[in-house]
Image (cartoon, rainbow, N blue to C red):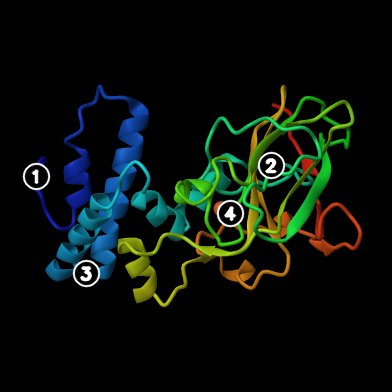
């Protein structure tokens, strides 16, 4: 009967309660969420104890969240959900640089630096020259492209994780391309690091026999007038965690060469071109 709850018609009973005059997208998303949530319980024949464990897990996940700690995003990341939503929303033609997760450590307002400048302020780590061009799909240079870069330091921490230890804006900077579309800066060869694993998500990874590490990477946001914004990383090609990134952020096309160089401005060199798609 309409409105009464049965095991068989459980999702339909819940969805039928929605008013017809609510926002259509909200109705679509909620109805689908309820259908899949109920199907999950039916397929697994979820026990009462498991339901209680799940409620407690979500309660602890919320409890550890703060202005500096977002455990729900970590949960989404480690379940591959963040990368799935990123993939759905950033389908690009072949040849364009692929997107990957933004991550929790971007800070807006990093200093604008001159091409060739260094971004490492703590003197730690092996220096690395990053250089290449920002181009369109036809290989034409894009002038005025804004490249916002950030990485961890040689100890595996971002400056915002160690405000009392690292200088502000350590391993961060913004560079703007000239007419040749070229960029060039000196950072460090980044190192792999664990995501914060002292909370419920870390415990989940432990129960699943998973490690919490991300392979070493340099973060980029590249924006230019008339082009889609690019949020991506380049990955250090010899990292042992490339095949098991705990947040699933690695794409083959984002693995960059890191070459040792003698007598250059830095101990390493990593060339990489960013190819943007028109708006
Ligand atoms: Fe990162």
Q: In this rendering, is residue 120 above or below 207?
A: above
Q: Is residue 44 visible?
A: yes
Q: Position of residue 241 (x, y in %)?
A: 60, 70
- Please report whichever mark, 2 or 4, sits nearer to the chain's N-terminal start: 2
Left or right of 262 in this view: 94: left
- Please report whichever mark, 3 or 1, sits nearer to the chain's N-terminal start: 1
Q: Which quadrant: the N terminus?
A: top left
Q: Residue at x 35, y 52 (%)?
A: 71
Query: Pointers 1 and 2 in contact (CB under 8 A)?
Result: no
Residue assigned mark 1: 1
- Please report whichever mark, 1 or 2, sits nearer to the chain's N-terminal start: 1
- In front: label 4 or label 1: 4
Most foreground residue, 179 or 32? 179
Q: Residue at x 80, y 51 (%)?
A: 129
Instruction: Tell me the CA gap for discs 4 and 1.
Output: 59 Å
Left or right of 15 in this view: 150: right
Most foreground residue, 248 or 124? 124
Residue assigned mark 3: 45
> Mark 2: is the Cβ under 8 angstroms from ligand 1?
no
Q: Position of residue 85 (x, y in %)?
A: 50, 46
Residue assigned mark 2: 92
Query: Pointers 4 and 1 in contact (CB under 8 A)?
Result: no
Q: Which quadrant: the C terminus?
A: top right
Q: Secondary structure at mark 1?
A: loop
Q: Residue 152, which numbered label? A: 4
Q: Secondary structure at mark 4?
A: loop
- In front: label 4 or label 3: 4
Q: Residue at x 49, y 52 (%)?
A: 165
Q: Position of residue 170 (x, y in %)?
A: 60, 45
Instruction: Tell me the CA gap for discs 2 and 4.
Output: 28 Å
């Amino acid at each position: 009967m309409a409105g009464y709850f049965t095991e068989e018609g459980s999702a339909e009973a819940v969805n039928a309660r929605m008013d017809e005059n609510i926002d259509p997208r909200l109705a679509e998303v909620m109805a689908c969420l309820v259908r899949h949530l109920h199907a999950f319980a039916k397929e697994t024949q979820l026990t009462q104890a498991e339901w209680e464990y799940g409620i407690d897990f979500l309660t602890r996940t919320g409890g550890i969240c703060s202005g500096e700690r977002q455990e729900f995003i970590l949960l989404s990341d480690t379940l591959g959900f963040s990368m799935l939503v990123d993939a759905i929303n950033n389908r690009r033609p072949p040849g364009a640089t692929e997107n990957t997760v933004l991550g929790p450590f971007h800070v807006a307002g990093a200093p604008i630096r001159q091409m060739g400048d260094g971004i490492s302020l703590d003197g730690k780590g092996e220096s690395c020259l990053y250089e290449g061009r920002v181009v369109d799909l036809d290989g034409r240079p894009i002038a005025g492209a804004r490249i916002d870069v950030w990485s961890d330091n040689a100890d595996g921490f971002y400056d915002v994780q160690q405000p009392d230890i690292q200088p502000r804006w350590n391993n961060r900077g913004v560079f703007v391309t000239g007419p040749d579309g070229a960029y060039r800066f000196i950072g460090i060869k980044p190192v792999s690091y664990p995501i914060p694993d002292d909370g419920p998500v870390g415990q989940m990874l432990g129960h699943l026999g998973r490690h919490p590490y991300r392979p070493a990477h340099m973060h980029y946001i590249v924006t230019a007038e008339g082009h889609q914004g690019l949020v991506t990383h380049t990955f250090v090609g010899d990292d042992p965690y490339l095949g098991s990134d705990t947040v699933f952020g690695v794409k083959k096309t984002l693995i960059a060469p890191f070459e040792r160089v003698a007598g250059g401005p830095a101990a390493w060199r990593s060339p990489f071109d960013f190819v943007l798609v028109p708006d």
